[in-house]
Amino acid sequence: MNRPTTVAEAVAEQAESAGRRGTRRLLPVVDEGHLSVVGVVVPWNRRATLVVTGALVLVLTTLVLSLTLGRLGIALVDLPAVLRGEGSKTEHFVVFTNRLPRALVGICAGAALGISGAIFQSVTRNPLGSPDIIGLNAGAAAGAAAVTLVWPGILPAPVGALLGGAVAVTLVLLGAGRGLQAPLRMVVIGIGVGAMSLAFVQFAITRTRREQAQEMAAWLNGSLNARSWEHVTIVAVALVVLGAAALALSRGLQQVEMGDDAAVALGVPARRVRLLAVSVGVGLAAAAVVVCGPVAFVALVAPQVARRVTGSAGPGMVAAGATGALLLVGADLVAVHQPWFGSLPVGVLTAGIGGLYLAVLLTREWRRGSL
């Protein structure tokens, strides 16, 4: 067999050998005709652009429905006037105090979770490597509870959530060690870390007043109820800043997915890229947890759906973010307006859907012999 004589040939051979070792699922097939550079598919392709555009249109549609539906119904033709401040005081109050902040928090938090999930699945090269599975969301919830209920005022809630999430991820990564690509091992460790984190949150709830305990219990289920413009600001700023950082890292992550040897051949510092990416992923997940609680499975499902629909070979940050936004705000719309059980926390619905998806994913990995 001839030895590769160029970097491009070395990368192509590395990618081919990765496929023979059973990691072909991490390099999805992309439509023919898409541009590739030295063996790496450029993430901006026509199919991905169409998918993202369609997802954003659906997000906008869901936003409009969220603003118009409810006990105080607002006609679609009257909505522009209400947004301009020309409606009644009641309509203005309901839209700008309740519905619009709630919907915007759902969109931004869903996008943050989708991008965070894409980062962790790319870093671990594991479809189960999402913040909720590896205990990051629960750790962030524990950190937020610690600085809010146990030691109030010691740190802002976002900082506490960030520290709690970072500790949880560190414990999981250290526990998994070289088993990062063994899904079952990482899932088991993540479940353990998440259980300990949630146990601490439950302890914190028992040490507070009844009113605070009720609010914390609802938040713990994952809820967009009673969100304010302060929550919108927190998650929107985090999404803009850290989302831009994630986009800057996406090319490096795509190359690292093919293996460290291929990344080094292309001059990519694999360890530095992973460290920066994990930091960004923790920040995004922590921001989402602060504003809506540990919403389950959005970070797991959104990146996988985005990859399959777009056929992207890389982490697909924009597509994952758009999919996550659509999943969370759409699930909240259904949870609030479904006619059977009254208004439900959005986390109840995402947990039910995500749990089914996780079972399917575990079954598929077991059949492939990856567990």
Image (tube, helix red, strand yellow):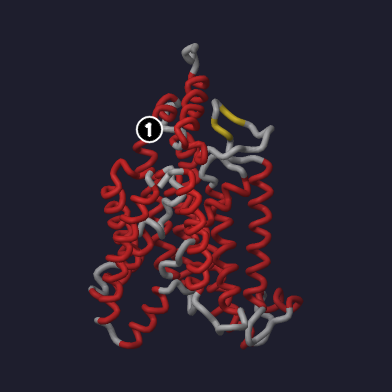
Q: Classify mark 1: residues with Cα within 10 Å, few (<14), some (14-19) or many (20+).
A: some
* Residue indicated by mark 1: 269
Residue 247 coordinates in the image, percent (x, y):
50, 45
Asked if residue 109 shows in the view, the reply is: no
Q: Residue at x 28, y 71 (%)?
A: 199
Q: Which residue is drawn at 33% across and 82% down?
A: 213
The picture quadrant where one finds residue 33 is top right
The residue closer to the viewer here, 7 or 128, is 128
The picture quadrant where one finds residue 257 is top left
Question: Eyeballing the image, is 279 above or below 218?
Answer: above
The residue closer to the viewer here, 368 or 140, is 368
The residue closer to the viewer here, 204 or 189, is 189
Type of amino acid under label 1? Pro
Asked if residue 80 shows in the view, the reply is: yes
Q: Residue at x 38, y 32 (%)?
A: 269
Q: In this view, does 232 lie to the left or right of 50?
A: left
Question: Eyeballing the image, is 260 above or below 179?
Answer: above
Residue 303 coordinates in the image, percent (x, y):
52, 52
The residue closer to the viewer here, 82 or 173, is 173
Q: In this view, does 323 lie to the left or right of 258?
A: right
Q: Which residue is drawn at 30% across and 57% down?
A: 168
Residue 155 coordinates in the image, percent (x, y):
27, 67
